[in-house]
Image (cartoon, rainbow, N blue to C red):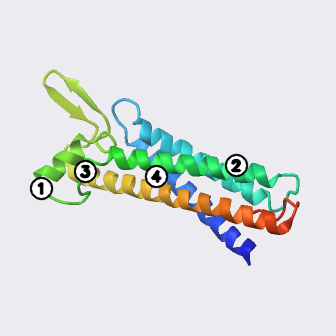
């Protein structure tokens, strides 16, 4: 029963890592001026690392030579990355009160946020940002929702990673010296 639960959690970890990777890459592609913010780049790395760790964990089901300690250590590292990425995105989006609210204050908060505005360049006294002039409110709102979804899935990845470590430890102790007991 525990190994079925572990397989389900591993699948959820793989799914959340893939979503983090996809959302982070999409957010990075919307960067028009300059390089993507470090939080977005780290999210891409975290998602890719989470996918890799999940695939290693799934491979450990079929390959006895993969030590359980190695998979648990990779899960721990992925969990740390997911938590760090989620916290970084949360803090970077802290100044934005609402992603969909109308009003000058909300629009200004979204426009000034480095994760949402697509990068800005100062030309003289003017600041030009990478949002389309006719639909900039909709673009900022959708980017804000993507960033929120990104950090939510990073927190889900962290929870799944911690759960995999706990399940792996229980299954490894229950199964004795065998490595196949860890998912």
Residue 142 x %, y %: 31, 55
Helix or strand or loop: what does disc 2 sit on?
Answer: helix
- The residue at the point 52 percent across, 57 percent down is 19
- The residue at the point 43 percent across, 36 percent down is 38
Report how far apart the C-alphas of labels 4 and 3 lie in the structure: 19 Å
Helix or strand or loop: what does disc 3 sit on?
Answer: loop
89 or 21, which lies in front? 89
Q: How many residues crowd around disc 1 within 10 Å: few (fewer than 14), some, or many (20 or more)?
A: few
Which of the two discs, 2 and 1, labels the residue nearer the N terminus? 2
Q: Which residue is mark 3?
A: 96
Q: Can residue 155 be seen by looking at this rendering?
A: yes
Report how far apart the C-alphas of labels 4 and 1 lie in the structure: 26 Å
Q: Nearer the viewer's eye, disc 1 or disc 3? A: 3
Report how far apart the C-alphas of labels 2 and 1 lie in the structure: 47 Å
Q: Which residue is mark 4?
A: 23
Q: Can residue 47 be seen by looking at this rendering?
A: no
- The picture quadrant where one finds residue 159 is bottom right
Q: Which residue is mark 1?
A: 103
Which of the two discs, 2 and 3, labels the residue nearer the N terminus? 2
118 or 105, which lies in front? 105
Up the image or down, 127 lies above or below 132; here it is: above
Which of the two discs, 4 and 3, labels the residue nearer the N terminus? 4
Q: Which residue is mark 2?
A: 73
In the image, taking residue 129 as reference, residue 16 lies left or right, namely: right
Q: Quadrant of the N terminus?
A: bottom right
User: How many numbered marks, from 0 up?
Assistant: 4
């Amino acid at each position: 029963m525990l190994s079925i639960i572990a397989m389900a959690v591993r699948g959820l970890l793989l799914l959340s890592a893939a979503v983090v990777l996809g959302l982070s890459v999409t957010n990075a592609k919307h960067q028009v001026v300059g390089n993507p913010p470090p939080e977005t780049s780290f999210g891409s790395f975290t998602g890719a690392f989470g996918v890799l760790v999940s695939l290693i964990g799934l491979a450990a089901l079929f390959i006895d030579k993969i030590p359980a300690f190695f998979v648990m250590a990779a899960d721990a590292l992925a969990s740390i990355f997911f938590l760090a990425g989620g916290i970084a995105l949360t803090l970077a989006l802290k100044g934005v009160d609402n992603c969909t609210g109308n009003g000058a204050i909300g629009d200004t908060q979204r426009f000034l946020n480095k994760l949402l505005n697509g990068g800005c360049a100062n030309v003289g006294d003017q600041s030009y940002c990478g949002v389309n002039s006719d639909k900039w409110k909709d673009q900022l709102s959708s980017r804000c929702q993507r960033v929120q979804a990104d950090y939510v899935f990073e927190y889900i990845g962290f929870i799944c990673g911690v759960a995999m470590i706990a399940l792996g430890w229980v299954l490894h102790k229950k199964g004795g010296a065998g490595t196949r007991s860890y998912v």
